[in-house]
Amino acid sequence: MRRRLALLVAVLALAGAATAVGYVRSRTSKSNTPLAWTGGCAFVIPDADGTPDIPLAKVSETLATATGTWSNTGCSYFKLHVDDPPEPGGEASLNRPVGKNYVVFRNDKWCPPDPKEPCYDGNATALTTVFYVDKPGDPDDGRILDADVELNNVNFAFTTDGTRPPGSGTKPVADLLNTVTHELGHLLGLDHTCYDGWNPCEDGACKVNHLSCTTELDCYPFDDTGRRIPNCSDALPPEVSEATMFNYASAGDTSKRSLTQDDIDGVCAIYPLAQDPKVCARVNTSEDNGCACGGRPAAPASLALLAALAVALRRRRS
């Protein structure tokens, strides 16, 4: 199964009451099993084709900073490494026989590799595709096999120092470190801290990860405390709105460069030091034990610049 999570720019009007705080884990589509890597590390590969906005060496440096942020929490065994040298032609696909986790700039078209699929939401600054085993009852159910980050250089310009890149015209400017730090949280198995309405009722029945719900509220995922996460349009507590994995942030924001306690709690709950497998190896994807690949349209909302980076989960029944 493949899950896609897209980083959007949006405006929010906040009202109402929030009901939850804490981190949220991504889950399988069939059994709602939390996603996680089973080894002690993962490798991410910068795309050698890069971006006209930022020198390739600076892209690799920024990615190394982001991976270090998630790797050095002090309470998680899991480590992210940046492969060197960068490789050209990275795609958001399940690479075989060894998974390769690419970070790719889309400079020409903001669309998936498969031309039969619809193009991504133009408001998305980035999108992470996570491939995992989706086989209820199997010991490997929920095991992440591969994850790829795509960056929207068609509709956005990227920066590392807050300045507009030469030749970028009037495109909105997104901070690269802010963006990839958030995206790597999805690669690790974390989801958004609020519900943004992109997963509506289908055919009269709400669904979460394709599990039927009786009301739309039932569609809201649970956080680590066992409470349903709030709607993103609610008045949100800082634990939700200030987290790196929060769906939204103001334009030009750099706060997602670092982790809040909820983000740290999340990655340390998934990969606690006491359960360190002490194995760091690339994932063999030739034996994926039932992984099926699919996707679902990105967030349908057309959201305007001024507020933020929203991450919309994409998935489709295989």
Image: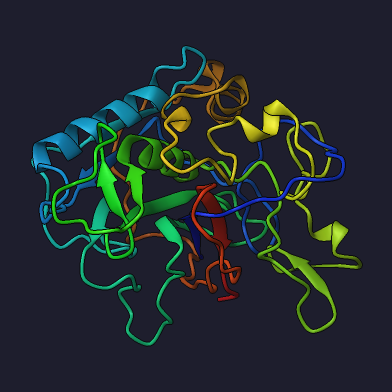
In the image, is 173 to the left or to the right of 242? left
Q: Where is residue 262 in the image (x, y as percent from the top left)?
A: 63, 25
Q: In which quarter of the image is residue 216?
A: bottom right
Q: Where is residue 72 in the image (x, y as percent from the top left)?
A: 40, 17
In this view, the residue farthest toward the front is 170
Vertical placement of residue 205 versus 84, above or below? below
Q: In which quarter of the image is residue 176?
A: top left
Who's the residue at 75% across and 36% down the image?
A: 236
Vertical placement of residue 124 versus 38, above or below? below
In the image, is 60 to the left or to the right of 279? left
In the image, is 214 to the left or to the right of 33? right
Query: Depth check: 189 or 277 in front?
Result: 189
Who's the residue at 90% across and 65% down the image?
A: 215
Query: Depth check: 99 or 302 in front?
Result: 302
Who's the residue at 61% across and 23% down the image?
A: 265
Q: Position of residue 12 (x, y in %)?
A: 65, 50
Q: In which quarter of the image is the C terminus?
A: bottom right
Does any portion of residue 101 appear in the rendered image?
no
Does any portion of residue 155 appear in the rendered image?
yes
In this view, the residue farthest toward the right is 214
In the image, is 236 to the left or to the right of 34? right
Query: Depth check: 146 or 275 in front?
Result: 146
Q: Which colour scheme is used?
A: rainbow
Number of marks:
0
Query: Depth check: 285 or 104 in front?
Result: 104
Who's the residue at 63% across and 46% down the image?
A: 34
Q: Position of residue 307 (x, y in %)?
A: 54, 47
In this view, the residue farthest toward the top is 74
